[in-house]
Image (tube, rainbow, N blue to C red):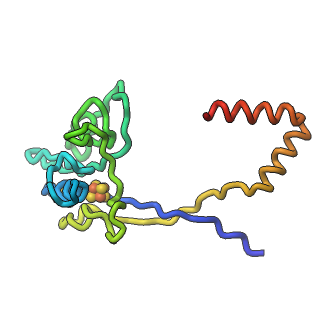
Amino acid sequence: MTPEKKPTRIIKNIRIEVDKCNGCRACEVICAAHHAQPRFSSTNPARARVRVIREPLSDIYVPVFAGEYTAAECAGRDRYVIDGKEYEECAFCRASCPSRDFFKEPDSGLPLKCDMCESDPTLEEPLCVTWCLADALIYEEREEEVEEEPRPEEVDEGLEALANKHGWDKVIDAVSRLKKAQA
Ligand code: SF4
Ligand code: SF4
């Protein structure tokens, strides 16, 4: 018997080749324009979901994509030295965090997060990738298997096995406690 094929999902990823980045900031401009209201009505890089760390005197250019929002800043800080170049604390952090102004909508202060340009389904790849003429941003997709939800009859069988072992009263009590905890 051939094993059943598991369902899959597409994982999207932008690979960053830092050595190729020249700090032109085209990625910031097109991202800001794409997310402006109405679309393409402004190019304020403060609205971009990508920020380029630029230190021309040290030849440092690093694009960083906006990630998750965090309500509290970290208690510690990391300082990186790569190939003899020293980067500022928090340089690579993707969080919209209270400790700095990065990745916050300038008017409302709401956190910004890269959405892979998914609001425009006609795009073949994220706009920052298309606009990066230095090829420092490479769009990649991969298919990943996902665990299937258990079938209802499997849940029934599992519950029955638990009831045989512990009794229905205990199983019902445990389920109702779990349900309350998740409410
Ligand atoms: S568009 Fe490309 S080269 Fe220009 S700053 Fe962004 S990542 Fe760097
Ligand atoms: S993928 Fe789209 S939303 Fe994310 S940084 Fe690039 S242009 Fe902005």
Nearest the camera: 48 or 177?
177
Q: Is residue 4 left or right of residue 44?
A: right
Residue 71 can be seen in this image: yes
- On the image, the x and y values in percent for residue 32 come to 20, 54
- On the image, the x and y values in percent for residue 145 come to 58, 62
The relative height of residue 76 versus residue 66 in the rendered view (above or below) is: above
- On the image, the x and y values in percent for residue 127 come to 26, 64
Q: Residue furthest top?
A: 75
Nearest the camera: 9 or 136?
9
Q: What residue is at 41 percent from the left and 61 percent from the top?
A: 12
Nearest the camera: 4 or 58?
4
Q: Quadrant of the N terminus?
A: bottom right
Residue 16 can be seen in this image: no
Q: How many marks?
A: 0
Q: Quadrant of the C terminus?
A: top right
Q: Residue furthest front?
A: 38
Q: What residue is at 21 percent from the left and 54 percent from the top?
A: 36
Q: Residue furthest left?
A: 57
- On the image, the x and y values in percent for residue 95 come to 33, 40
Q: Is residue 21 left or right of residue 176?
A: left
Q: What residue is at 26 percent from the left and 42 percent from the top?
A: 103
Q: What residue is at 34 percent from the left and 28 percent from the top?
A: 73
Nearest the camera: 51 or 110?
110
Quadrant of the rendered image containing residue 31: bottom left
The relative height of residue 29 versus residue 106 in the rendered view (above or below) is: below
The relative height of residue 173 versus residue 143 in the rendered view (above or below) is: above
Quadrant of the rendered image containing residue 172: top right
